[in-house]
Image (cartoon, grey):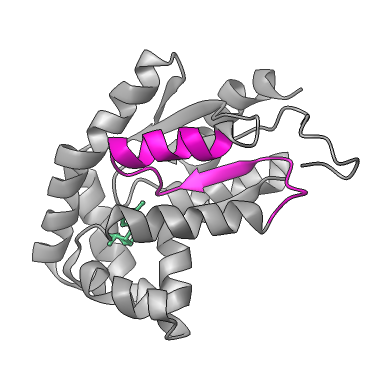
């Protein structure tokens, strides 16, 4: 609802940033936020914050994350709903690491519909698996993330991505919202390609 009490809303730029672990979603999110003034909603970051603060949600999520498994949908979707509601003045959101399965994608559509808005586009960062593994190995040295340290856990995350998350791209393709971007290249080159997709969507 806006300040006048009406449920009419100006169109928001809501982006789902999609790609396997190590595709560069976090890096590109930062640049997108700077240019388009969106609220960053990274489910991975939110979970890590909950874990650090030892909240009830963090304690529930921790074991799944440490194994490289997906956190159950009801926990994840509830957390996203709360974050959207915490940002009533947002010009739009960048969803990073969410939705990660088709059930979450449908839930996100319902959450946004209830606010008279929708996903504007899904940007899919395309990176070959060999390159992802190399990047994740590098990231493990500095991220301190438990799920980056063990090659088995990395493989689990890549397998889950292939089985559960890839169908989300087909879901948005059917809605004519899928935009593929080559995720190999310099950070600025990749960002330029993203901007080419996003600039025309700005109202
Ligand atoms: P990320 O930082 O996006 O790589 O996420 C780190 C971990 O958090 C994932 O491996 C999952 O265990 C969990 N996670 C993040 N986003 C989701 C999601 N949308 N659904 C379920 N689990 C998630």
Q: Is residue 28 visible?
A: no
Instruction: Give 99 or 21, whichever is nearer the viewer.
Output: 99
Query: Would you identify the image quadrant in which residue 126 lies?
Result: top left
Res. 85 visible in picture: yes
Q: Can residue 196 be found in the magenta stretch?
A: no
- Residue shown at 41% from the left, 46% from the top: 98
Residue placed at 19% from the left, 60% from the top? 69
Front in this rendered view, residue 34 or 183 = 34
Q: Is residue 174 above or below residue 44?
A: above
Give the residue displayed 48% in from the left and 66% down from the top.
46
> Is residue 43 rendered to the left or right of residue 111?
left
Q: What range is drawn magenta here? A: 87-112
Residue 144 shown left or right of residue 177 in the figure: left
What percent of the width, then of the height, locates residue 62? 29, 75
Task: Where is residue 140? Give x, y as percent.
Answer: 28, 70
In the figure, is residue 15 to the left or right of 85? left
Residue drawn at (73%, 50%) of the image: 88
Q: Residue 93: horizontal and vertical position, in percent? A: 61, 43
Q: Residue furthest right?
A: 4
In this image, 9 relative to 118: left or right?
right
Residue 111 highlighted magenta (yes or no)? yes
């Amino acid at each position: 609802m806006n300040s006048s009490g009406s449920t009419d809303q100006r169109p928001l730029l809501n982006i789902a940033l999609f790609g396997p672990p190590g595709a560069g979603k976090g890096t590109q999110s930062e640049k997108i936020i700077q240019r388009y003034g969106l609220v960053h909603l990274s489910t991975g970051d939110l979970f890590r914050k909950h874990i650090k603060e030892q909240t009830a949600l963090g304690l529930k999520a921790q074991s799944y994350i440490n194994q490289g498994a997906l956190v159950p949908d009801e926990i994840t979707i509830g957390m996203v709903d709360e974050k959207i509601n915490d940002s009533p003045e947002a010009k739009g959101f960048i969803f990073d690491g969410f939705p990660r399965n088709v059930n979450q994608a449908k839930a996100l559509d319902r959450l946004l519909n209830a606010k008279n808005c929708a996903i504007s586009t899904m940007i899919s960062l395309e990176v070959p698996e060999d390159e992802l593994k190399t990047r994740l190995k590098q990231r493990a040295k500095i991220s301190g993330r438990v799920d980056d340290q063990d090659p088995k856990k990395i493989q689990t995350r890549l397998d889950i991505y292939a089985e559960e998350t890839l169908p989300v791209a087909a879901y948005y393709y059917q809605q004519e919202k899928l935009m593929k971007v080559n995720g190999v290249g310099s950070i600025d080159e990749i960002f330029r390609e993203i901007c080419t997709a996003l600039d025309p969507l700005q109202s």
